[in-house]
Image (cartoon, coloured by chain):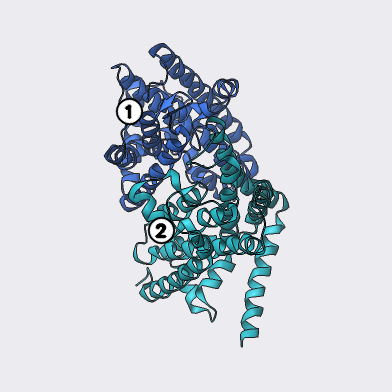
Amino acid sequence: MADHRLRAYGALLGAQARSQAAYRASFAVDLVGNVGATVFDVVTVLVIFGVTRELGGFTLRETLVMVGLSACAFATADLLVGNVERLPAYVRTGLFDAVLLRPLGALPQLLLMDLPLRKASRAVFGLAVLLVALARAGIEWTPGRVALAVAAPLAGVVFFGSVFVATATVSFYWTESGELANSVTYGGRDFTSYPVTIFDGWFRAAFAYGMGFAFVSYQPALALLGRADPLGLPAWMGWASPTVALVAAALAATAWRVGVRHYRSTGS
Amino acid sequence: MGSVTATVAPPTESNVILWFRTFGAIVRSGFRRYATYRQAALAGAVTNIVFGFLRCYILFGAAGAAGTAAGYDRAQFATFVWAGQGMLAVILLWGRPELAERIRTGDVASDLLRPVHPVTSYLATDLGRAGWACVSRLLPPVLVGPLFFDVYLPARWSTVPLFVVSATVAVVLCFGCRFLVNATAYWLQDVRGPQILWTLGSGVLAGLYFPLPFLPDALFLALQLATPFPSLLQTPLDVLVERDPTGVQAGLVGLQVGWAVAILALCRLVQRRAERRLVVQGG
């Protein structure tokens, strides 16, 4: 049974890959265009460091570790599940009915129906930024830190993936929510590209700890760099990101199930 | 009787009053059309507000302990960010490629049959849309920002009318740029390439990602003179926060007007060339 399903998902993915690569010039333009978005995110950080020597008490090299973690995690999550952003359109047009009628999981279908392979370039660039940043940050490598350097980006992917899914479920209740989800997904990407120390007040509390974005890049970067948290959290918090990611994934899965149950077709 | 395309001069004498009345009617219908999407406007405004917080804190971080960077102080940064988040939707930097879609499907044929030049009628619709965006998208961040941050208010009376002119010209200019991107569909059918280049280029070069004076002076000046991008967002916002004396402000607005006229002229030229080669599918 499971074998049949895998084959069906494989067929969906294969069809997508073939159809997207069929128009080679368009696909090439898309690959280049998509990497551009992440390149400019990194360039923005570099430009800001052109007018200041440190940001929230962190140097360029230290900040770039956070940028790398954030870019790598966001771009990979966007490649794998970012497509769920289109859920509002599926709900509004009633196309989601067709998805539910098929004997496959609704979420995997939704992701595979238009897997944006063009975003692969972005994920590769994100990983490159992370590797360069880690190499140049002057980290004293220990086995624990090597493990964290591998685990933190993976946890970040799971975390951002959960955010994509959880925010998309809003459209089950509010069909016209439009770009509202962007404020948390893309907002989270921007938030995690900078040290948490530059933000302030309830805004910082909500994004960093309420929604957990501090555990994508800031806390792991502190642990990797061996710096004490200027905000006073204990050092082991840097190692908490996989746990936070799993909690986020569980919450997102619950939100998705509840959302699908709540779904009423636009036709009824 | 000659060609029936809209860009050919109509056979009757033109009537200026009638022209204005038609233009006004299309503007009003544009306003009404977009005013139906109230929930989407609310969702968009909330998103702008979240990004207002993010960008404001980031620029404050750049200003550091000294509190100034690249000629802006903290209050000027706050006004720059919050007004910028509102302006973003008014000029509609990133709209859907609606016209490109009409060209691809052939729906554009019905636009060409109307007795109004297509560029004029699209511009009128866009002005109506911008009017609605002023109410639904500009006001919320401009009202929310000052509740949480000390913002800079213009000190000179001349700044207010200059900003109004500058913002209006930015709307027209941004419309023209988007039209040109969409009009590549007459030749390419699929506008994803130009669309991506526009999305990337306009965001960075208009001053949305970071204020352009963060760049080296020569590069900023070159961008301002040689490209229309800074005139879309950076210039109106610089006028609003009074980064320059009145004379320079007026000069910047003049430069904007120059770009808007040039781009609109180019729009008409492109439309004319496009109509000569357009083959509507099935027609």
Q: Position of residue B243 (x, y in %)?
A: 41, 21
Going by the picture, which residue comes out furthest to the bottom?
A1
In the rendered structure, find residue A209 and report the number of the disc placed on it: 2
The answer for which chain carries disc 2 is: A
Q: Considering the numbered disc 1 on the image, is that residue within a helix, a strand or a loop? A: loop
Q: Residue at 49% across / 65% down in the picture?
A: A162
Q: Could you tell me residue A87's position as x and y percent?
A: 46, 63
Tag 2: amino acid: Tyr
Describe residue B39's horizontal placement relative to residue B269 as left or right. left
Count of numbered labels shown in the rendering: 2
Res. B115 visible in picture = no
Residue at image mark 1: B152
For marks 1 and 2, give the CA distance: 31 Å
- Residue A118, position as x, y percentages in the image: 65, 55
Left or right: residue A262 compared with residue A44: left
Indicate the chain coloured cyan by its letter.
A
Mark 1: amino acid: Tyr
Q: Nearer the viewer, residue B136 or B127?
A: B136
